Amino acid sequence: MSLDDSPREECGVVGIVAPGREVARLAYFALHALQHRGQESAGIAVSDAGHVMVQRDLGLVANVFDESALRSLRGDAAIGHVRYSTTGSNRWENAQPVVRNRGRAVVALGHNGNLTNTDDLRALVDDGDGEPLMATTDSELMAAVLAAQEGSLLDAACAVMPHLSGAYSVVCLTESELVAFRDAHGVRPLVVGRLDGGWCVASETCALDQIGAEFVRDVAPGEALRVTADGIESRQALPPRPPRLCVFENIYFARPDSRLDGASLWQQRHDMGVELAREAPADADLVVGLPDSGTPAAIGFAHQSGIPYGEAVVRNRYVGRSFIQPDQDLRRQGVRLKFNPLREVIDGKSLVVVDDSIVRGTTTRQVVQMLRDAGAREVHMRISSPPVQWPCFYGIDMPDRSELVASEHTVDEIAALTGCTTLAYLSLPGLARALGMPLEGFCHACFTGEYPIPVPEQALKLRLEDAIDPARV
Ligand code: SF4
């Protein structure tokens, strides 16, 4: 639901090789399309076949780059990154692309995901070239391990990938090579596109659309590829494993105008609403979606149920993840900073309210109260995903188990805690029907606790063992 209570995507990446074109400007526009994947920092590295230049800073893409910055970033190849911090705090050193010396050359790297074996990697680096780590992220560790390898950057990526555990979609750049690679299960998305005069990779197809690139294919799980002006040189660096794309990309994270594995996310989200209406119908006057993420599923619910769809809440699109925190009085207003209800639409009506997920439950409770204050007679909450009961270890910022309201409360209890008239979640089979493919092809650990990639025991213990405190709901 794009609020502070929601899970957040960690990062978005892009890589472009297009000699003769303004690659930094192309990367800049691609990053604009990926801005929803991270709003804390942005960066671009360019290579001009002799040097690598990097500009990165805290803030939105539009704040970090101006015309003169883009003009000064000249080259034939560029990588770009937007970040929301899940590992390492939000400070300048952690902005990406991170840069690491590689002999007399450098390697710049941007990463989307989260590694689960950072201790092993840290030991490798400590035994390595001795250059101190400046940042606190797993991405810098990855760059350090990569920089320590001999041979081409593609050779280095293929040598390093077997040592990485976790989720990663990576772009990296030296003076002479742009390489991208994806973890063995393909947890985070990465696609290949063809540009006029070059080739590119990006986290989502919406970034390709933004820069006029044509979608070619998804990067395969475990694949490493060198992007050149003439095409893609591909190597299957890791033995193929069952794909486990993060199903939350389909439910919420990726933009609805993107396509994943050839499927339209808007259509899948619409169909989640259709399935939800079949599984949990409600007698109501109006179906509303919490903008923007709940909208496609709300439209699907309305289509299936025959209940009219309407806009009942206006979202302030300019209140993002801000560095300036509201004062105490404003904070008390909670969701009112982002949503304003349309009393003339809501007053006296029974509403079906469709949202994509409930994490802690605090936001849902505030939304329900806001709608009741605006005159709603009944609020039937319908959630277009199953209950989130387990934390994520693969790059999504989700609270520990003790703070996930569904981990120790039944659906009826959550309905009572949040104050809605009725509450229903989409079932796992319903989700699979909406996706049009079996759930075996996805990571769904935050719903089921079935983690497809091993998680260190200590991290698991820390995040799973606390009992939930109902006072936090
Ligand atoms: S645990 Fe959930 S949010 Fe994390 S990768 Fe798996 S499906 Fe996505």
Image (cartoon, helix red, strand yellow):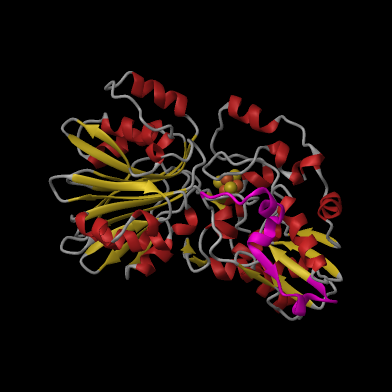
Foreground residue among 227 and 131: 131
Would residue 118 be found to the left or right of residue 435 on screen? left
Asked if residue 107 can be seen in this view, the reply is yes
**In the image, what residue occupies the spot 45% across and 29% down?**
118
Vertical relation: 201 (above or below) 447: below
Residue 332 within the magenta-colored segment of the rendering? yes
Name the quadrant of the N terminus: bottom right
Vertical relation: 327 (above or below) 349: above
State which region is magenta. Answer: 323-351
Would residue 157 be found to the left or right of residue 19 on screen? right
Q: Position of residue 429 (x, y in %)?
A: 70, 58
Q: Position of residue 358 (x, y in %)?
A: 70, 53
The number of numbered discs placed on residues in the rendered structure image is 0
**In the image, what residue occupies the spot 76% across and 75% down?**
343
Q: Position of residue 5 (x, y in %)?
A: 65, 50
**In the image, what residue occupies the spot 72% across and 36% down?**
402
Foreground residue among 276 and 299: 299
Q: Position of residue 26 (x, y in %)?
A: 29, 63
Would residue 151 be found to the left or right of residue 186 on screen? left
Quadrant of res 283: bottom right
Quadrant of res 446: top right
Name the quadrant of the C terminus: top right
